[in-house]
Amino acid sequence: MADEVTFYEAVGGEETFRRLVHRFYEGVAADPILRPLYPEEDLGPAEERLRLFLIQYWGGPRTYGERRGHPRLRMRHAPFPIGGAEHDAWLAHMRDAVDEIALPEPLEKMLWDYLVMAANSMINKLD
């Protein structure tokens, strides 16, 4: 029996996630709602963290966990006020990024459904 292909492999591996996350952070860099949530002057470290997290989540190398341990996404995002406006802005930039990488529909749907769920779970304030 052949090994099953991971989502990570099916979408093109690291290069696809590099393109996705880079495009996302291009939007974040100019966004008046999201940019203030990133305390680092350079968005590079945040871009790397998200890229490594998504790569690991979708079946690629476990570099994120080796460097940072368990993701603990809600805990790591707790210091930042995330309400409806932040949620919507995050998803808008991620939608642009997902559209740009042009995955086949079933793979795009799997990725998008996960991103929407993740964005919903990060909300920690009422607007």
Image (tube, helix red, strand yellow):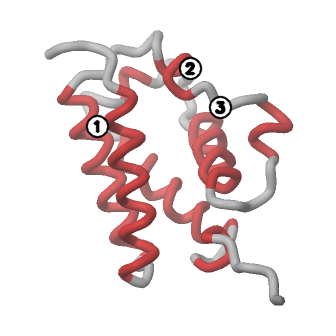
Residue under pointer 1: 31
Query: Nearer the observer, disc 2 or disc 1?
Result: 2
Q: CA distance from mark 2 to mark 3?
A: 8 Å
- List x then y, in percent, for residue 80: 41, 15
Q: Is residue 83 above or below residue 101?
A: above
The residue sitting at 78% across, 38% down in the picture is: 65
Q: Is residue 2 above or below residue 116?
A: below
**Which of the labelled discs sits on residue 71, or is there none?**
3
Q: Is residue 107 above or below residue 72?
A: below
Label 3: few (<14), some or many (≥20) within 10 Å?
A: few
31 sits left or right of 43 in the view: left
Q: CA distance from mark 2 to mark 1?
A: 21 Å
**Which of the labelled discs sits on residue 94, or is there none?**
none
Asked if the residues shown at circle 2 and circle 1 are in contact, with their CB atoms under 8 angstroms apart, the answer is: no
Secondary structure of the residue carrying numbered label 3: loop
Residue under pointer 2: 76
- List x then y, in percent, for residue 24: 42, 52
Asked if the residues shown at circle 2 and circle 3 are in contact, with their CB atoms under 8 angstroms apart, the answer is: yes
The residue sitting at 33% across, 48% down in the picture is: 116
